[in-house]
Amino acid sequence: MRKKSRQQNKIITFIVTFLLMFTGLYYLGLSYVPLELYDTQTMTADMPEHFYVDNWCKMEFGRKEAVLWDMTRVDCLTKDYAIEFDFAKKWAESVGQSLYYAELTHKKPAVVLILKNWTDLRYVKRVERLNKDIQIFLVKAF
C-alpha cells in the first residue's frame, strides 16, 4: 500500500513539474516580447490604418504611399526601409508585402505592427521567428 502511494506521489510530482515548466516556457519563451527592443510609439486607438501611416511616416521623414514601377504602393518609404503597416493580426500579409517592396526598392524590409491590445504581441513573436532580417516597429493603439 505504501509503495503505491509513493509511486503515485512521484507521478503527480512529475506531472505538476512538467506542467509548470511547460507553462513557464510558453509565457517566457514563446509569447514574451521585450518591448524595449523595438521602436514603440503610442498613438490614438481605434483609427484606420492610414492614420497611423500618416503620423508615423511624417515623424520618420518618409514618403508615404510611394508608387513603384509595377504600380504597387509602399506604405512608407524612408532612406533605409520599405515599410508596410498593418494591424498585428495581419502580420503575414505585412511581411510578404514588405519583402516584396524591399526587393523592388533595394532597401531593407520593415513592418509596423499596430497593436490593438496586449494579446497582439503573439503576432510580433511570429514575425521574429521568421528569421528574415525584417525590422519590426510597433504602434500601441490601446
Image (cartoon, helix red, strand yellow):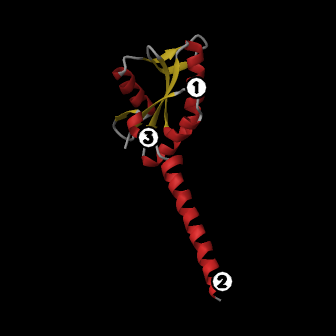
Q: Specify which label sits upstream in the sequence, 2 or 3.
A: 2
Q: Pick whichever, 80 or 7, lies toward us.
A: 7
Q: Could you say where residue 16 lies in the image, as x and y percent from the top left?
A: 55, 68
Q: Please give the name of the residue rendered at 58% of the width and 10% of the height, measured from the top-left corner.
A: 69
Q: Specify which label sits upstream in the sequence, 1 or 3.
A: 1
- Pointer 2: residues within 10 angstroms few (<14), some, or many (20+)? few
Label disc, if present, on residue 136 of the rendered structure:
none
Q: Is residue 95 above or below residue 6?
A: above
Query: What's the amino acid at mark 2?
Result: Lys
Q: Pick whichever, 129 or 71, lies toward us.
A: 129
Q: Is residue 47 visible?
A: no
Q: Could you say where residue 123 lies in the image, as x and y percent from the top left?
A: 52, 41
Toward the bottom, the furthest residue is 1
Q: Quadrant of the N terminus?
A: bottom right
- Pointer 3: residues within 10 angstroms few (<14), some, or many (20+)? many
Q: How many marks?
A: 3
Q: Please give the name of the residue rendered at 36% of the width and 41% of the height, measured from the top-left corner.
A: 45
- Residue at numbered disc 2: 4
Q: Comparing marks 2 and 3, which lies closer to the viewer? A: 2
Residues tagged 2 and 1 counted as in contact (Cβ below 8 A) = no
Determine the CA span between mark 1 and mark 3: 19 Å
Query: What's the amino acid at mark 1?
Result: Gln
Q: Please give the name of the residue rendered at 37% of the width and 20% of the height, measured from the top-left corner.
A: 60
- Residue at numbered disc 1: 97
Q: Comparing marks 2 and 1, which lies closer to the viewer? A: 2
Q: Is residue 25 above or below residue 68?
A: below
- Residue at numbered disc 3: 115
Q: Quadrant of residue 127?
A: top right
Q: Is residue 33 above or below residue 22?
A: above
Toward the top, the furthest residue is 69
